[in-house]
Image (cartoon, coloured by chain):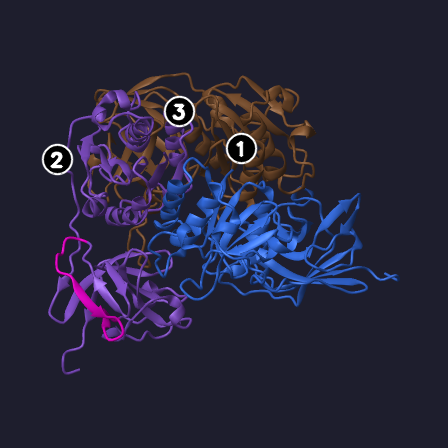
Chain colours: A purple, B brown, C blue
Amino acid sequence: MIISLTTDFGLGDGYVGAMKGVISGIAPGVPLVDITHIINPQDLGGAAYVLWTAVPYFTEDSVHLVVVDPGVGTARRAIASRTPWGVVVGPDNGIFTYLWAAARPDLTVALENARYCRTTISSTFHGRDVFAPAAAYVAAGLPLEELGPVVSDPVTLPLPQMEIGSRSIQGEVIYIDHFGNAITNIGRLIWEGPVLHLDPAFGTTEARMINASRVTVRLPGRIVLPNRGGPTNRASHSDIGRIHRTYGETTQGELLALVGSEGMLEIAVNQGDAARTLGLRVGTPVELVEPGEGD
Amino acid sequence: MIISLTTDFGLGDGYVGAMKGVISGIAPGVPLVDITHIINPQDLGGAAYVLWTAVPYFTEDSVHLVVVDPGVGTARRAIASRTPWGVVVGPDNGIFTYLWAAARPDLTVALENARYCRTTISSTFHGRDVFAPAAAYVAAGLPLEELGPVVSDPVTLPLPQMEIGSRSIQGEVIYIDHFGNAITNIGRLIWEGPVLHLDPAFGTTEARMINASRVTVRLPGRIVLPNRGGPTNRASHSDIGRIHRTYGETTQGELLALVGSEGMLEIAVNQGDAARTLGLRVGTPVELVEPGEGD
Amino acid sequence: MIISLTTDFGLGDGYVGAMKGVISGIAPGVPLVDITHIINPQDLGGAAYVLWTAVPYFTEDSVHLVVVDPGVGTARRAIASRTPWGVVVGPDNGIFTYLWAAARPDLTVALENARYCRTTISSTFHGRDVFAPAAAYVAAGLPLEELGPVVSDPVTLPLPQMEIGSRSIQGEVIYIDHFGNAITNIGRLIWEGPVLHLDPAFGTTEARMINASRVTVRLPGRIVLPNRGGPTNRASHSDIGRIHRTYGETTQGELLALVGSEGMLEIAVNQGDAARTLGLRVGTPVELVEPGEGD
């Protein structure tokens, strides 16, 4: 039993503390852990990705309170949804899309039972007044069904799809992490000896074997050289000639492609910042190109 | 039972960890939660405001350890004070002013009993050597009276007062939050249908009804247009023509006034940063102007 | 019983949350506390110092999970080591050097027993797949010996040594904290009335008495004046004429030397940022010069 918190509230205000206070009054003694509070303000896609990298490592009796809520005070629903990794609680705006794609939820309900909200509900801070109490009551043992009616059509974000051609796989950057690593939707990739097995993560059904040492990873190339202020070299694209197993196979400053901790193709610079160096952003196309028969 | 921590220590050093270690040795098993550790260094007013937005959501058996302490090592007192939302522990420099204005404390004592400090007290880190042990002993059940003598004159900061005229209310910005929202001392405002009831928060005794759709919110206007580097347009003041209930009633980028989560008048930009856009700072005057009879 | 977490993962991604999830599944109910997650990426010396300022305040039954791991996926060992302040768990790359210098560990083992790792071990995220499970199993009561074979030669970083001359002590800056205070390796300094007793912290055996009011603290002087953009004044060195007991003995903006919370000589600016003002960095030499007999 544990409650995790994920928000875009930042780390400097009292908002997160207020939610922790509300929870501790309803579910005293339940441990609280922070996942992150610096989701980019109102970045639903970023929130969805971060949750997908953290929530599946928790057990079924956990509760995950998520407040990234640009629609607060409008008619958007508030929901709780039971997953194999615990109950997720938050606004119905698509932040649970990746989790639901990984495992269809048992049950999703709308938080409409006023008994499990704070007495006065502000129009700007449902994290404190609606979501935190709901999460705490669930952690304290309340059946999900008590919170409100079943929701059969929760909001989802469009999932970035791979396009799998005969000799290439096209995807895109879906997240830039703290180190500047660019994570793509090309995955999940699983090592089988020297070869990668592609086991599609989001919806695509076709699997594929990839020769890691012969494949080319192609990025649209804006190469920003480190000399700031000076002239900037631009290349039409950047090619990486193989997929490595680990940073340790490369030298400091070297650009590499590898399989990240979630099994997704990832672009990195050894002890550097790939996103800044290469100008990569969420949505930047990335292509895996396999050699032709005559190559 | 829970202990919260609020400091200006930042997030990168070992200071917060040292306090958590000291606490865990004296009060093992008591959950610890962070409120914030990035209060602006030595910003007593900011600390006082943040505590006011977080601490009142905790229950009476909580302990709140607060270390924003520019006077460490001088003769300033160290105190613990019992509020309806738990015992607050920290330096006697005014950081509890807003909490005490919201509810007069039962009892305030000075932390003078050396038995409840660490054996060696550094002259620069009372958070670890004085405040953390005191907070932990209180959480472990020690009566407040054991910590030291009663303090009858704790230090308070001047509370920013509203000035209520016949057709206007003058206040000021008291806090800028993570989103760039500017929170004022004009409050507490409570919706009663389409009308706002003003229920003074800090000391002022006069109440007032305000027509939210006809009132003008006037700011001293430095409008910084988004085109950075280009010419800056400056207006002598900015007017907002009404008070909204929620961000959702406005469009992206729109300037609005609304009632924040603590019931205070707040200046915001929908999915933007009002403080940066308008050059608002703590102390910037804000005025509510009601239409005259002939308007 | 408590588990602390220290990483260079930053605060915005899901990596720390994933580790907390793994731990909560193996050691449910054990409180988790964050020390810091913003160690400079792959800064082993900074990690070693931060751990030294935090871990020794915990009790013996604690577990400290540390993941600053530039060598992840290479042959570097993973270790757990029993100290007087709990078991430290992390990569064998020198991050525990200062702790081990403060107290030789009872036992250090390599994490080689696959039973106590996650079933699938990624090549890039041993924090989640190796270190978090090990820390959780230890917290749940597993004897250290079960994790793997004894390590007799763990990796250590070179300890910065003081050079003690007849009338001077030479050291260097070993850490810059959040406030911009520059902490040196000159210590531990203990006040005995008006005099400082030097009780060497890292290896040096010679002790020394220092007259705090007559000693000169000499820094190589790059004085960066506050007027940014304007001309910069540079001095060949900066002298501070004494060692103070506390910030409160100086005025706002004043440069001072004092004994920091760990007993090390520290360079600070009262309510300012000494490192930025003086251009101090890790490795900057600092010298204590005592007056000669004829002075």
Among the 4 quarters of the image, the one containing residue A256: bottom left
Q: Which residues are magenta?
A: A202-221
| Residue B28 tag number | 1
* Whole-percent x, y for residue B96 in the image: 51, 28
Q: Is residue A159 left or right of residue C66?
A: left
The reply to the same-chain question for discs 1 and 2 is: no
Nearest the viewer among C120 and B122 is: C120
Q: Which residue carries the number 2 mark?
A: A152
Which label's residue is closer to the chain start, 3 or 2? 3
Contact check, label 1 and label 3, Cβ < 8 Å: no
Q: Is residue A208 shown in magenta? A: yes
Pointer 3 residue: A25
Q: What distance separates the C-alpha of mark 1 from that of mark 2? A: 44 Å
Element under label 2?
A: loop
Q: Is residue B1 visible?
A: yes
Residue A149 highlighted magenta (yes or no): no
Three-letter amino acid code of the residue under disc 2: Ser
Cα separation between marks 1 and 3: 20 Å
